[in-house]
Image (cartoon, helix red, strand yellow):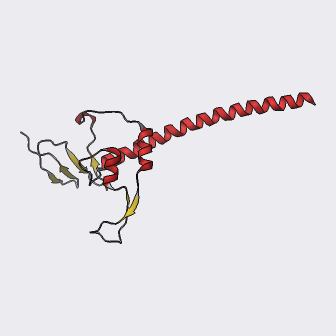
């Protein structure tokens, strides 16, 4: 079968790391002239796709400890922020193991939590608007009654 190079440093400046020697589309890419990795996310290469509940994800994110810390090997001068992989795995059950957090997973969790927060705010705002309209109508009736008694 087709054998793709697992690491390609291309003439255009792009870098490709493949996690499968038989599939050119498997892995991550640092496109030419960019400063960020692009991770594989093609719908056509995915299976067992299940919709999520953004509110549930939001609740798990809110409950998950997030802290700042330093890698032992880097020393105290370099700080990072985020959850511990064990807490992330316990909350979401995503990724290959409980000592690493896959960037696709944490990005997906963040986006799902944003959707959950948006849904929560829309629902709460609609409820508050309904309460405010009911109070305004009640106040108008009270004011009308007070005016008619004068």
Residue 15 vs residue 11, the one in the foreground: 15
Quadrant location of residue 36? bottom left
Residue 84 lies, in percent from the top left, at: 34, 56
| Residue at (35, 71) in percent of width and height | 76
Residue 92 lies, in percent from the top left, at: 34, 44
Relative to 3, residue 34 above or below: below
| Count of labels in the image | 0
Outermost residue on the right side: it is 150
Residue 41 lies, in percent from the top left, at: 28, 41
Outermost residue on the left side: it is 1
Relative to 87, residue 120 above or below: above
For the N terminus, the image quarter is top left
**From the viewer's perspective, is 26 left or right of 87?**
left
| Residue at (18, 54) in percent of width and height | 11
For the C terminus, the image quarter is top right
Residue 87 vs residue 114, the one in the foreground: 87
**From the viewer's perspective, is 101 left or right of 82?**
left
| Residue at (37, 55) in percent of width and height | 83
| Residue at (16, 53) in percent of width and height | 8
Residue 104 lies, in percent from the top left, at: 31, 46
Quadrant location of residue 93? top left
**From the viewer's perspective, is 8 left or right of 147?**
left
């Amino acid at each position: 079968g087709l054998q793709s190079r697992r690491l390609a440093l291309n003439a255009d400046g792009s870098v490709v790391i493949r996690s499968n020697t038989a599939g050119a589309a498997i892995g991550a890419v640092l496109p030419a002239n960019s400063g960020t990795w692009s991770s594989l996310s093609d719908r056509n290469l995915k299976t067992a796709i299940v919709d999520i509940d953004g509110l549930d994800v939001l609740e798990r994110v809110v409950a998950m400890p997030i802290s700042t810390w330093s890698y032992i090997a880097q020393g105290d001068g370099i700080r990072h922020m985020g959850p511990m992989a064990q807490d992330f795995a316990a909350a979401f059950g995503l990724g290959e193991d409980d000592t690493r957090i896959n960037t696709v997973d944490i990005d997906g969790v963040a986006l799902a939590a944003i959707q959950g927060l948006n849904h929560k705010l829309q629902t709460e705002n609609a409820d508050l608007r309904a309460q405010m309209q009911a109070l305004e109508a009640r106040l108008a009736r009270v004011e009308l009654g007070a005016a008619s008694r004068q």
